[in-house]
Image (tube, rainbow, N blue to C red):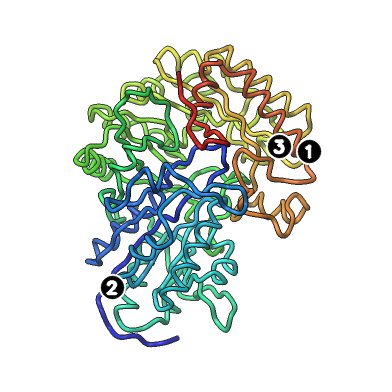
Amino acid sequence: MHNFPKKRVKVTLLYPPEQTWPEMMCKPNGSLAYPMLGGALIENGTEVKIFDACVGNESDNLDDVFYTSSDLPTGMKRTGVTDERILEEVADSDIVGLTSIFTHQETMVLNTSRLIKKTFPDKLIVAGGVNARHRQKKFFDNGVDLICTSESEKTIVEIVRTIESGSRNFTHIPMVAYLENGTPKQSSAIGDIIWNLDDLPLPAWHLLPNDRYWKIRRPHGGHFEPDEELKYASMMTSLGCPFSCTYCHIAGERKGTMSGPIGKFRIKSDQRVLKELDILKSLGVKQIFIEDDSIFGKKRRAIELIKKIRNLDFEILDVNGVNVIHLLKSGEPDFEVIETLAEAGFRDIALPFESANPRIISKYASSKWNIQQSNIPALLKALKDYNLRIAGNYMIGYPDETREEIIHTINFAKECMNNGLDAASFFLVMPLPGTPMFDSAMRDGNLSTDYDPDKMHWQKANMINTIVPSDELEKIRDKAWEEINDHRYTKYKKGMLVDKNSGEIHKIE
Protein backbone atom coordinates (compact mmCIF):
# COMPACT_ATOMS: atom_id res chain seq x y z
CA MET A 1 0.00 0.00 0.00
CA HIS A 2 1.22 3.54 -0.83
CA ASN A 3 0.60 6.82 0.93
CA PHE A 4 -0.71 9.70 -1.16
CA PRO A 5 -1.00 13.43 -0.45
CA LYS A 6 -4.07 14.50 1.49
CA LYS A 7 -6.66 16.20 -0.73
CA ARG A 8 -10.35 16.69 -1.34
CA VAL A 9 -11.60 13.82 -3.44
CA LYS A 10 -13.70 13.95 -6.60
CA VAL A 11 -15.79 10.92 -7.62
CA THR A 12 -17.25 9.89 -10.96
CA LEU A 13 -19.86 7.14 -10.94
CA LEU A 14 -19.80 5.76 -14.45
CA TYR A 15 -22.24 3.55 -16.33
CA PRO A 16 -20.13 1.96 -19.10
CA PRO A 17 -21.33 1.82 -22.71
CA GLU A 18 -23.95 -0.85 -23.36
CA GLN A 19 -23.57 -3.94 -25.49
CA THR A 20 -26.55 -5.64 -27.12
CA TRP A 21 -27.25 -8.35 -29.61
CA PRO A 22 -27.78 -6.87 -33.11
CA GLU A 23 -31.52 -7.53 -33.17
CA MET A 24 -32.24 -6.06 -29.74
CA MET A 25 -33.03 -2.49 -28.80
CA CYS A 26 -30.41 -0.88 -26.59
CA LYS A 27 -31.74 0.58 -23.34
CA PRO A 28 -29.66 2.74 -20.99
CA ASN A 29 -28.77 1.15 -17.65
CA GLY A 30 -29.90 3.99 -15.39
CA SER A 31 -30.07 1.70 -12.34
CA LEU A 32 -30.69 3.08 -8.86
CA ALA A 33 -27.19 2.17 -7.68
CA TYR A 34 -25.64 5.49 -8.60
CA PRO A 35 -28.36 7.86 -7.37
CA MET A 36 -28.17 6.03 -4.03
CA LEU A 37 -24.37 6.23 -3.83
CA GLY A 38 -24.43 9.78 -5.15
CA GLY A 39 -26.81 10.78 -2.36
CA ALA A 40 -24.44 9.33 0.24
CA LEU A 41 -21.48 11.23 -1.22
CA ILE A 42 -23.40 14.51 -1.40
CA GLU A 43 -24.41 14.09 2.24
CA ASN A 44 -20.70 13.65 3.03
CA GLY A 45 -19.85 16.87 1.18
CA THR A 46 -18.01 15.01 -1.59
CA GLU A 47 -17.94 16.33 -5.15
CA VAL A 48 -19.62 13.66 -7.27
CA LYS A 49 -21.05 13.30 -10.75
CA ILE A 50 -22.75 10.51 -12.67
CA PHE A 51 -21.69 9.91 -16.26
CA ASP A 52 -23.71 7.49 -18.35
CA ALA A 53 -21.35 6.56 -21.16
CA CYS A 54 -24.24 4.95 -23.04
CA VAL A 55 -26.03 8.28 -23.61
CA GLY A 56 -23.33 10.86 -22.82
CA ASN A 57 -24.10 14.36 -21.55
CA GLU A 58 -24.63 17.85 -22.97
CA SER A 59 -21.24 17.60 -24.68
CA ASP A 60 -22.43 14.64 -26.77
CA ASN A 61 -24.83 14.37 -29.69
CA LEU A 62 -27.32 11.55 -29.15
CA ASP A 63 -27.32 10.78 -32.86
CA ASP A 64 -23.61 10.04 -32.64
CA VAL A 65 -23.35 8.29 -29.28
CA PHE A 66 -26.67 6.51 -28.83
CA TYR A 67 -28.35 6.09 -32.19
CA THR A 68 -25.13 5.02 -33.89
CA SER A 69 -23.61 1.75 -32.66
CA SER A 70 -20.35 0.03 -33.54
CA ASP A 71 -19.59 -3.63 -34.08
CA LEU A 72 -17.82 -5.68 -31.41
CA PRO A 73 -15.65 -8.74 -32.18
CA THR A 74 -18.30 -10.92 -30.50
CA GLY A 75 -20.93 -9.91 -33.04
CA MET A 76 -22.66 -7.68 -30.50
CA LYS A 77 -23.19 -3.92 -30.83
CA ARG A 78 -21.53 -1.27 -28.67
CA THR A 79 -23.61 1.81 -27.88
CA GLY A 80 -22.12 4.86 -26.21
CA VAL A 81 -19.45 7.51 -26.25
CA THR A 82 -15.91 6.91 -27.45
CA ASP A 83 -13.09 5.77 -25.19
CA GLU A 84 -11.63 9.26 -25.51
CA ARG A 85 -14.80 10.80 -24.10
CA ILE A 86 -14.77 8.39 -21.17
CA LEU A 87 -11.21 9.43 -20.37
CA GLU A 88 -12.15 13.11 -20.63
CA GLU A 89 -15.01 12.66 -18.15
CA VAL A 90 -12.92 10.87 -15.51
CA ALA A 91 -9.72 12.90 -15.99
CA ASP A 92 -10.23 15.14 -12.95
CA SER A 93 -11.66 12.44 -10.66
CA ASP A 94 -9.74 10.60 -7.98
CA ILE A 95 -12.20 7.70 -7.68
CA VAL A 96 -14.17 6.05 -10.48
CA GLY A 97 -17.08 3.81 -9.52
CA LEU A 98 -18.31 1.07 -11.88
CA THR A 99 -21.44 -0.97 -11.26
CA SER A 100 -21.69 -4.53 -12.54
CA ILE A 101 -25.20 -5.78 -11.95
CA PHE A 102 -26.06 -7.38 -15.29
CA THR A 103 -23.86 -10.31 -16.25
CA HIS A 104 -23.98 -9.76 -20.01
CA GLN A 105 -22.56 -6.25 -19.41
CA GLU A 106 -19.47 -7.58 -17.63
CA THR A 107 -17.30 -7.18 -20.71
CA MET A 108 -18.10 -3.49 -21.04
CA VAL A 109 -17.38 -2.88 -17.35
CA LEU A 110 -14.02 -4.64 -17.62
CA ASN A 111 -13.13 -2.86 -20.86
CA THR A 112 -13.84 0.47 -19.18
CA SER A 113 -11.84 -0.30 -16.03
CA ARG A 114 -8.91 -1.53 -18.12
CA LEU A 115 -9.03 1.62 -20.27
CA ILE A 116 -9.06 3.97 -17.28
CA LYS A 117 -6.35 2.12 -15.35
CA LYS A 118 -4.02 2.06 -18.37
CA THR A 119 -4.38 5.81 -18.90
CA PHE A 120 -4.65 6.91 -15.27
CA PRO A 121 -2.87 4.29 -13.14
CA ASP A 122 -3.19 6.34 -9.93
CA LYS A 123 -6.97 6.63 -10.03
CA LEU A 124 -8.79 4.33 -7.62
CA ILE A 125 -11.26 2.17 -9.50
CA VAL A 126 -14.05 0.78 -7.33
CA ALA A 127 -16.54 -1.82 -8.55
CA GLY A 128 -19.72 -3.10 -6.98
CA GLY A 129 -22.75 -5.21 -7.74
CA VAL A 130 -23.52 -8.90 -7.45
CA ASN A 131 -21.52 -9.75 -10.56
CA ALA A 132 -18.38 -7.94 -9.37
CA ARG A 133 -18.34 -9.53 -5.94
CA HIS A 134 -18.72 -13.04 -7.31
CA ARG A 135 -16.17 -12.62 -10.12
CA GLN A 136 -13.47 -10.88 -8.11
CA LYS A 137 -10.33 -12.23 -9.78
CA LYS A 138 -11.64 -11.27 -13.21
CA PHE A 139 -12.30 -7.72 -12.04
CA PHE A 140 -8.96 -7.31 -10.27
CA ASP A 141 -7.18 -8.65 -13.36
CA ASN A 142 -8.78 -5.86 -15.41
CA GLY A 143 -7.79 -2.81 -13.41
CA VAL A 144 -10.28 -2.71 -10.53
CA ASP A 145 -8.60 -1.81 -7.23
CA LEU A 146 -11.42 -2.35 -4.75
CA ILE A 147 -14.70 -4.28 -4.78
CA CYS A 148 -17.65 -3.42 -2.57
CA THR A 149 -19.26 -6.70 -1.59
CA SER A 150 -22.47 -5.40 -0.02
CA GLU A 151 -24.70 -2.33 0.05
CA SER A 152 -22.26 0.54 -0.25
CA GLU A 153 -23.70 3.85 0.94
CA LYS A 154 -21.50 3.72 4.03
CA THR A 155 -18.65 1.99 2.23
CA ILE A 156 -18.16 4.58 -0.50
CA VAL A 157 -17.97 7.35 2.10
CA GLU A 158 -15.34 5.43 4.08
CA ILE A 159 -13.34 4.90 0.90
CA VAL A 160 -13.43 8.64 0.17
CA ARG A 161 -12.36 9.51 3.72
CA THR A 162 -9.49 7.03 3.53
CA ILE A 163 -8.21 8.56 0.28
CA GLU A 164 -8.59 12.05 1.69
CA SER A 165 -6.46 11.02 4.70
CA GLY A 166 -3.61 10.18 2.32
CA SER A 167 -3.90 6.40 2.69
CA ARG A 168 -4.79 3.55 0.37
CA ASN A 169 -5.02 0.95 3.09
CA PHE A 170 -8.66 -0.20 3.14
CA THR A 171 -8.37 -3.12 5.54
CA HIS A 172 -10.36 -1.21 8.18
CA ILE A 173 -13.43 -0.88 5.95
CA PRO A 174 -16.05 -3.65 6.25
CA MET A 175 -17.51 -5.37 3.21
CA VAL A 176 -14.70 -4.68 0.74
CA ALA A 177 -12.35 -6.96 -1.16
CA TYR A 178 -8.87 -6.06 -2.34
CA LEU A 179 -5.72 -7.71 -3.62
CA GLU A 180 -3.14 -8.88 -1.13
CA ASN A 181 0.02 -10.36 -2.65
CA GLY A 182 -1.90 -10.93 -5.86
CA THR A 183 -4.78 -12.79 -4.17
CA PRO A 184 -8.30 -11.39 -3.60
CA LYS A 185 -8.99 -10.93 0.09
CA GLN A 186 -12.12 -9.92 1.96
CA SER A 187 -11.76 -7.33 4.71
CA SER A 188 -12.09 -8.80 8.19
CA ALA A 189 -13.43 -5.54 9.64
CA ILE A 190 -16.79 -5.95 11.36
CA GLY A 191 -19.71 -4.08 9.86
CA ASP A 192 -23.45 -4.27 9.66
CA ILE A 193 -26.10 -3.48 7.10
CA ILE A 194 -28.54 -0.60 7.44
CA TRP A 195 -31.64 -2.08 9.06
CA ASN A 196 -33.66 1.14 9.25
CA LEU A 197 -33.86 2.29 5.65
CA ASP A 198 -34.85 5.79 6.75
CA ASP A 199 -31.19 6.16 7.71
CA LEU A 200 -30.16 5.90 4.06
CA PRO A 201 -29.22 9.16 2.33
CA LEU A 202 -31.80 10.45 -0.13
CA PRO A 203 -31.08 9.25 -3.68
CA ALA A 204 -29.60 11.91 -5.95
CA TRP A 205 -31.83 11.41 -9.00
CA HIS A 206 -30.88 14.88 -10.24
CA LEU A 207 -27.40 13.57 -11.09
CA LEU A 208 -28.84 11.28 -13.77
CA PRO A 209 -29.17 12.49 -17.38
CA ASN A 210 -32.95 12.36 -17.04
CA ASP A 211 -33.74 14.64 -19.98
CA ARG A 212 -31.71 12.37 -22.25
CA TYR A 213 -33.44 9.25 -20.91
CA TRP A 214 -36.84 10.85 -21.47
CA LYS A 215 -35.93 11.91 -24.99
CA ILE A 216 -34.73 8.39 -25.82
CA ARG A 217 -37.95 6.90 -24.34
CA ARG A 218 -36.59 3.44 -23.61
CA PRO A 219 -37.25 2.44 -20.00
CA HIS A 220 -36.82 -1.20 -19.06
CA GLY A 221 -40.55 -1.78 -18.73
CA GLY A 222 -43.96 -0.38 -19.49
CA HIS A 223 -46.14 -0.12 -22.58
CA PHE A 224 -46.44 3.37 -24.05
CA GLU A 225 -48.20 5.03 -26.95
CA PRO A 226 -45.92 6.72 -29.51
CA ASP A 227 -47.18 10.23 -28.63
CA GLU A 228 -47.31 9.67 -24.86
CA GLU A 229 -45.25 12.08 -22.76
CA LEU A 230 -42.68 10.04 -20.88
CA LYS A 231 -40.84 11.37 -17.82
CA TYR A 232 -40.00 8.37 -15.72
CA ALA A 233 -37.87 7.41 -12.75
CA SER A 234 -37.30 4.36 -10.57
CA MET A 235 -37.53 4.13 -6.80
CA MET A 236 -37.56 1.52 -4.05
CA THR A 237 -39.71 1.58 -0.91
CA SER A 238 -38.08 -1.55 0.54
CA LEU A 239 -35.05 -3.78 0.13
CA GLY A 240 -34.72 -7.55 0.25
CA CYS A 241 -37.37 -10.22 -0.10
CA PRO A 242 -39.10 -12.81 2.09
CA PHE A 243 -38.59 -15.41 -0.65
CA SER A 244 -35.34 -17.23 -1.54
CA CYS A 245 -35.69 -18.39 -5.14
CA THR A 246 -32.63 -20.26 -6.35
CA TYR A 247 -32.33 -18.18 -9.56
CA CYS A 248 -32.25 -14.89 -7.60
CA HIS A 249 -29.17 -13.30 -6.02
CA ILE A 250 -31.19 -12.57 -2.87
CA ALA A 251 -31.04 -16.26 -1.96
CA GLY A 252 -27.26 -15.89 -1.64
CA GLU A 253 -27.36 -12.69 0.41
CA ARG A 254 -27.63 -13.98 3.94
CA LYS A 255 -25.71 -14.00 7.19
CA GLY A 256 -22.23 -15.46 6.83
CA THR A 257 -21.81 -14.57 3.16
CA MET A 258 -19.57 -11.83 1.77
CA SER A 259 -22.55 -9.49 1.36
CA GLY A 260 -24.07 -10.12 4.76
CA PRO A 261 -27.85 -10.52 5.19
CA ILE A 262 -28.91 -7.81 2.73
CA GLY A 263 -31.49 -10.19 1.29
CA LYS A 264 -33.55 -9.76 4.46
CA PHE A 265 -36.73 -7.77 3.87
CA ARG A 266 -36.47 -4.17 5.16
CA ILE A 267 -38.74 -1.16 4.65
CA LYS A 268 -38.74 2.61 4.44
CA SER A 269 -41.35 4.45 6.48
CA ASP A 270 -44.32 5.99 4.70
CA GLN A 271 -42.96 9.44 5.51
CA ARG A 272 -39.63 8.61 3.89
CA VAL A 273 -41.30 7.28 0.73
CA LEU A 274 -43.49 10.37 0.42
CA LYS A 275 -40.43 12.58 0.82
CA GLU A 276 -38.72 10.76 -2.05
CA LEU A 277 -41.82 11.15 -4.20
CA ASP A 278 -41.82 14.88 -3.51
CA ILE A 279 -38.25 15.02 -4.82
CA LEU A 280 -39.22 13.14 -7.97
CA LYS A 281 -42.20 15.42 -8.55
CA SER A 282 -39.91 18.46 -8.24
CA LEU A 283 -37.78 16.97 -11.03
CA GLY A 284 -40.81 16.73 -13.31
CA VAL A 285 -41.26 12.96 -13.04
CA LYS A 286 -44.68 11.68 -14.12
CA GLN A 287 -44.21 7.89 -14.24
CA ILE A 288 -42.79 5.85 -11.37
CA PHE A 289 -41.32 2.38 -11.67
CA ILE A 290 -41.37 0.81 -8.20
CA GLU A 291 -38.40 -1.55 -8.21
CA ASP A 292 -38.88 -3.28 -4.83
CA ASP A 293 -38.00 -6.96 -4.87
CA SER A 294 -41.14 -7.56 -2.82
CA ILE A 295 -43.25 -4.48 -2.19
CA PHE A 296 -45.87 -6.63 -0.44
CA GLY A 297 -43.36 -8.33 1.84
CA LYS A 298 -45.45 -6.73 4.58
CA LYS A 299 -48.89 -6.66 3.05
CA ARG A 300 -50.70 -4.31 5.41
CA ARG A 301 -47.83 -1.83 5.29
CA ALA A 302 -47.91 -1.83 1.49
CA ILE A 303 -51.67 -1.27 1.38
CA GLU A 304 -51.50 1.72 3.72
CA LEU A 305 -48.52 3.18 1.85
CA ILE A 306 -50.15 2.86 -1.54
CA LYS A 307 -53.31 4.55 -0.25
CA LYS A 308 -51.14 7.55 0.65
CA ILE A 309 -49.53 7.60 -2.80
CA ARG A 310 -52.76 7.57 -4.75
CA ASN A 311 -53.43 11.33 -4.54
CA LEU A 312 -49.99 12.38 -5.76
CA ASP A 313 -50.83 12.28 -9.47
CA PHE A 314 -48.17 9.78 -10.56
CA GLU A 315 -48.62 6.89 -12.93
CA ILE A 316 -47.26 3.74 -11.30
CA LEU A 317 -45.89 1.35 -13.91
CA ASP A 318 -44.59 -2.20 -14.06
CA VAL A 319 -44.46 -2.69 -10.33
CA ASN A 320 -41.79 -5.19 -9.41
CA GLY A 321 -42.23 -7.57 -6.52
CA VAL A 322 -45.99 -8.17 -6.73
CA ASN A 323 -46.17 -11.92 -6.35
CA VAL A 324 -49.31 -13.92 -7.10
CA ILE A 325 -49.78 -14.77 -3.45
CA HIS A 326 -49.87 -11.05 -2.56
CA LEU A 327 -53.02 -10.57 -4.64
CA LEU A 328 -54.84 -13.49 -3.03
CA LYS A 329 -56.47 -14.04 0.30
CA SER A 330 -57.19 -17.69 1.15
CA GLY A 331 -56.74 -18.46 -2.54
CA GLU A 332 -59.32 -15.91 -3.76
CA PRO A 333 -58.76 -12.38 -5.08
CA ASP A 334 -57.87 -9.88 -2.37
CA PHE A 335 -60.07 -7.02 -3.48
CA GLU A 336 -58.67 -4.58 -0.96
CA VAL A 337 -55.20 -4.93 -2.48
CA ILE A 338 -56.44 -4.77 -6.06
CA GLU A 339 -58.67 -1.75 -5.44
CA THR A 340 -55.84 0.03 -3.63
CA LEU A 341 -53.47 -0.53 -6.55
CA ALA A 342 -55.97 0.71 -9.10
CA GLU A 343 -56.94 3.83 -7.14
CA ALA A 344 -53.28 4.74 -6.57
CA GLY A 345 -52.64 5.02 -10.31
CA PHE A 346 -51.14 1.61 -11.00
CA ARG A 347 -51.87 0.56 -14.55
CA ASP A 348 -49.47 -2.33 -15.27
CA ILE A 349 -48.84 -5.42 -13.17
CA ALA A 350 -46.58 -8.32 -14.09
CA LEU A 351 -47.48 -11.57 -12.36
CA PRO A 352 -44.45 -13.84 -11.83
CA PHE A 353 -46.13 -17.23 -12.21
CA GLU A 354 -42.69 -18.77 -12.93
CA SER A 355 -44.16 -22.24 -13.57
CA ALA A 356 -47.41 -24.18 -13.48
CA ASN A 357 -45.69 -27.19 -11.93
CA PRO A 358 -45.80 -27.47 -8.12
CA ARG A 359 -42.58 -29.50 -8.17
CA ILE A 360 -40.72 -26.70 -9.91
CA ILE A 361 -42.17 -24.00 -7.67
CA SER A 362 -41.20 -25.98 -4.58
CA LYS A 363 -37.67 -26.82 -5.73
CA TYR A 364 -36.62 -23.58 -7.40
CA ALA A 365 -39.04 -20.80 -6.36
CA SER A 366 -39.21 -21.30 -2.58
CA SER A 367 -42.87 -22.41 -2.78
CA LYS A 368 -43.87 -18.80 -3.37
CA TRP A 369 -47.36 -19.67 -4.54
CA ASN A 370 -49.66 -22.69 -4.63
CA ILE A 371 -51.29 -23.21 -8.02
CA GLN A 372 -53.64 -25.88 -6.67
CA GLN A 373 -55.09 -23.56 -4.04
CA SER A 374 -55.23 -20.36 -6.11
CA ASN A 375 -58.25 -19.20 -8.12
CA ILE A 376 -56.30 -17.63 -10.97
CA PRO A 377 -59.30 -17.13 -13.33
CA ALA A 378 -61.06 -15.14 -10.61
CA LEU A 379 -57.89 -13.15 -9.91
CA LEU A 380 -57.43 -12.20 -13.55
CA LYS A 381 -61.07 -11.19 -13.86
CA ALA A 382 -60.80 -9.03 -10.77
CA LEU A 383 -57.70 -7.27 -12.09
CA LYS A 384 -59.39 -6.59 -15.43
CA ASP A 385 -62.50 -5.30 -13.67
CA TYR A 386 -60.26 -2.59 -12.24
CA ASN A 387 -58.83 -1.80 -15.70
CA LEU A 388 -55.35 -3.05 -14.86
CA ARG A 389 -53.14 -4.26 -17.67
CA ILE A 390 -51.71 -7.66 -16.70
CA ALA A 391 -48.69 -9.50 -17.99
CA GLY A 392 -47.77 -13.01 -16.95
CA ASN A 393 -44.15 -14.11 -16.64
CA TYR A 394 -43.30 -17.78 -17.05
CA MET A 395 -39.94 -19.52 -16.81
CA ILE A 396 -39.01 -22.68 -18.67
CA GLY A 397 -35.81 -24.66 -19.06
CA TYR A 398 -34.99 -25.55 -15.47
CA PRO A 399 -32.15 -28.11 -15.52
CA ASP A 400 -34.36 -31.13 -14.73
CA GLU A 401 -37.61 -29.85 -16.25
CA THR A 402 -39.26 -32.30 -18.65
CA ARG A 403 -41.00 -31.48 -21.91
CA GLU A 404 -44.28 -32.45 -20.29
CA GLU A 405 -43.73 -29.93 -17.51
CA ILE A 406 -42.81 -27.21 -20.01
CA ILE A 407 -45.94 -27.88 -22.07
CA HIS A 408 -47.99 -27.83 -18.88
CA THR A 409 -46.73 -24.32 -18.11
CA ILE A 410 -47.41 -23.16 -21.68
CA ASN A 411 -50.95 -24.55 -21.56
CA PHE A 412 -51.47 -22.79 -18.25
CA ALA A 413 -50.35 -19.53 -19.91
CA LYS A 414 -52.95 -20.14 -22.64
CA GLU A 415 -55.61 -20.55 -19.97
CA CYS A 416 -54.49 -17.32 -18.35
CA MET A 417 -54.80 -15.49 -21.69
CA ASN A 418 -58.30 -16.89 -22.12
CA ASN A 419 -59.13 -15.54 -18.67
CA GLY A 420 -58.01 -11.97 -19.32
CA LEU A 421 -54.21 -11.85 -19.27
CA ASP A 422 -52.99 -9.16 -21.68
CA ALA A 423 -49.60 -10.66 -22.48
CA ALA A 424 -47.46 -13.67 -21.68
CA SER A 425 -43.69 -13.61 -21.55
CA PHE A 426 -41.58 -16.77 -21.49
CA PHE A 427 -38.11 -16.57 -20.01
CA LEU A 428 -35.43 -19.21 -20.27
CA VAL A 429 -33.93 -19.95 -16.86
CA MET A 430 -30.63 -18.11 -16.49
CA PRO A 431 -28.14 -19.11 -13.74
CA LEU A 432 -26.42 -15.84 -12.85
CA PRO A 433 -23.31 -15.51 -10.67
CA GLY A 434 -24.22 -15.00 -7.03
CA THR A 435 -27.28 -17.26 -7.14
CA PRO A 436 -27.61 -20.80 -5.76
CA MET A 437 -28.65 -21.91 -9.25
CA PHE A 438 -25.34 -20.69 -10.67
CA ASP A 439 -23.44 -22.71 -8.08
CA SER A 440 -25.45 -25.85 -8.79
CA ALA A 441 -25.19 -25.33 -12.56
CA MET A 442 -21.41 -25.16 -12.29
CA ARG A 443 -21.33 -28.20 -10.00
CA ASP A 444 -23.73 -30.31 -12.08
CA GLY A 445 -22.31 -29.52 -15.52
CA ASN A 446 -25.08 -27.19 -16.69
CA LEU A 447 -22.50 -24.47 -17.31
CA SER A 448 -18.98 -24.87 -18.62
CA THR A 449 -16.22 -23.69 -16.30
CA ASP A 450 -15.14 -21.16 -18.94
CA TYR A 451 -18.64 -19.92 -19.75
CA ASP A 452 -18.86 -16.65 -21.67
CA PRO A 453 -20.70 -13.90 -19.75
CA ASP A 454 -21.44 -12.16 -23.06
CA LYS A 455 -23.78 -15.04 -23.84
CA MET A 456 -25.68 -14.78 -20.56
CA HIS A 457 -28.67 -13.16 -22.17
CA TRP A 458 -32.28 -13.36 -21.07
CA GLN A 459 -33.37 -14.34 -24.59
CA LYS A 460 -30.93 -17.23 -24.86
CA ALA A 461 -30.89 -20.73 -23.40
CA ASN A 462 -27.76 -20.35 -21.31
CA MET A 463 -27.42 -23.82 -19.81
CA ILE A 464 -26.13 -27.06 -21.28
CA ASN A 465 -27.04 -30.66 -20.47
CA THR A 466 -30.63 -29.77 -19.59
CA ILE A 467 -33.28 -32.47 -20.13
CA VAL A 468 -34.67 -30.41 -23.01
CA PRO A 469 -31.72 -29.22 -25.17
CA SER A 470 -31.03 -25.49 -25.38
CA ASP A 471 -31.82 -25.06 -29.08
CA GLU A 472 -35.16 -26.80 -28.60
CA LEU A 473 -35.95 -24.62 -25.58
CA GLU A 474 -35.51 -21.47 -27.64
CA LYS A 475 -37.81 -22.82 -30.38
CA ILE A 476 -40.45 -23.83 -27.82
CA ARG A 477 -40.24 -20.39 -26.19
CA ASP A 478 -40.49 -18.50 -29.48
CA LYS A 479 -43.40 -20.56 -30.73
CA ALA A 480 -45.33 -20.21 -27.48
CA TRP A 481 -44.82 -16.45 -27.40
CA GLU A 482 -46.00 -16.03 -30.99
CA GLU A 483 -49.01 -18.31 -30.70
CA ILE A 484 -50.32 -17.26 -27.29
CA ASN A 485 -50.05 -13.47 -27.51
CA ASP A 486 -52.30 -11.21 -29.53
CA HIS A 487 -50.70 -10.28 -32.84
CA ARG A 488 -50.95 -6.57 -32.00
CA TYR A 489 -48.84 -7.13 -28.90
CA THR A 490 -46.22 -9.18 -30.73
CA LYS A 491 -46.12 -6.49 -33.42
CA TYR A 492 -45.53 -3.86 -30.72
CA LYS A 493 -42.72 -5.88 -29.19
CA LYS A 494 -41.17 -6.60 -32.55
CA GLY A 495 -41.24 -2.84 -33.06
CA MET A 496 -38.65 -2.76 -30.28
CA LEU A 497 -36.25 -4.88 -32.30
CA VAL A 498 -33.48 -3.55 -34.47
CA ASP A 499 -32.91 -4.57 -38.06
CA LYS A 500 -29.75 -6.69 -38.20
CA ASN A 501 -28.68 -5.24 -41.55
CA SER A 502 -29.60 -1.56 -41.36
CA GLY A 503 -29.40 -1.09 -37.60
CA GLU A 504 -32.71 0.79 -37.72
CA ILE A 505 -35.52 0.27 -35.25
CA HIS A 506 -38.59 -1.35 -36.79
CA LYS A 507 -41.43 1.11 -36.98
CA ILE A 508 -44.70 0.48 -35.16
CA GLU A 509 -47.63 1.07 -37.46
Q: CA distance from mark 1 to mark 2?
A: 52 Å
Quadrant in the picture for the C terminus: top left
Q: Residue at x 68, y 19 (%)?
A: 411
Kind of residue sitting beneath label 2: Val
| Count of marks, rendered view | 3
What amino acid type is highlighted by mark number 1?
Pro
Q: Earlier in the sequence, mark 2 or mark 3?
A: 2
In terms of secondary structure, where does tag 3 sit? loop
Three-letter amino acid code at disc 3? Gly
Image marks 1 and 3: residues in contact by CB distance under 8 Å: no
Q: Position of residue 408 (x, y in %)?
A: 72, 23
Which residue is painted at 46% across and 39% down in the image?
A: 294
Q: Earlier in the sequence, mark 1 or mark 3?
A: 3
**Residue that mark 2 sits on:** 9
Residue 282: give x, y in percent of width and height.
19, 40
Outermost residue to the front = 502
- In percent of width and height, residue 295 lies at 42, 38
**Category of crowding for the residue at label 3, using alpha-carbon neighbours closer than 10 angstroms: few (below 14), some (14–19), many (at least 20):** many
Between 508 and 45, the residue placed more toward the observer is 508
Pointer 3 residue = 397
Q: Is 209 located above or below residue 218 in the figure?
A: below
